[in-house]
Amino acid sequence: MIESTVYARSSGYVVRWTKDIGAPVKKGELLAQITGPEIDQQLNQAVAAARADRCQRSAGKEHRDALAKFAREGRGHAARTWTSG
């Protein structure tokens, strides 16, 4: 039997244990499930930032498409006539 010390890679709270101390385990087997409010918050912030970036890029594309349409139709100063919805 090989013994090993287990160290935490991040902080969090134990949701459930799947093995008792001293129980044999196999490589890759789940020992415990944890939740990390700080990590969850960072993830949520990153997801929100990515969504905001996607929306901003989409709005920019819509604006460029509208300007191109006005230019194709020969409406002159498209930038002054285009309005956002």
Image (cartoon, grey):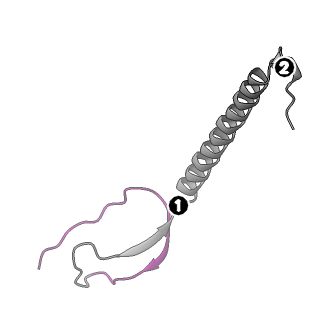
* Residue 22, position as x, y percentages in the image: 25, 82
Q: Up-down: is 62 above or below 71? A: below
Amino acid beneath label 2: Arg
Q: Quadrant of residue 20?
A: bottom left
- Tally of numbered tags: 2
In the picture, the disc for residue 36 is: 1
Q: Identify which residue is drawn at 71% across, 31% down.
A: 65
Q: Up-down: is 4 above or below 58? A: below
Q: Where's the N terminus, which quadrant?
A: bottom left
Q: Nearer the viewer, residue 60 or 38?
A: 60
What is the secondary structure assignment of the residue under circle 2? loop
Judged from this view, the residue extending furthest toward the left is 1
Left or right, residue 44 beside residue 68? left
How crowded pointer 1 is (Cα within 10 Å; few <14, some 14-19, many 20+) is rated as some
Q: Is residue 44 magenta?
A: no
Q: Is residue 19 magenta?
A: yes
Q: Identify which residue is drawn at 26% across, 85% down.
A: 23
Q: Nearer the viewer, residue 65 or 56?
A: 65
Q: Where's the C terminus, which quadrant?
A: top right
Q: Up-down: is 61 above or below 14? A: above
- Extent of the magenta region: 1-21
Left or right, residue 57 beside residue 10? right
Left or right, residue 17 beside residue 1? right
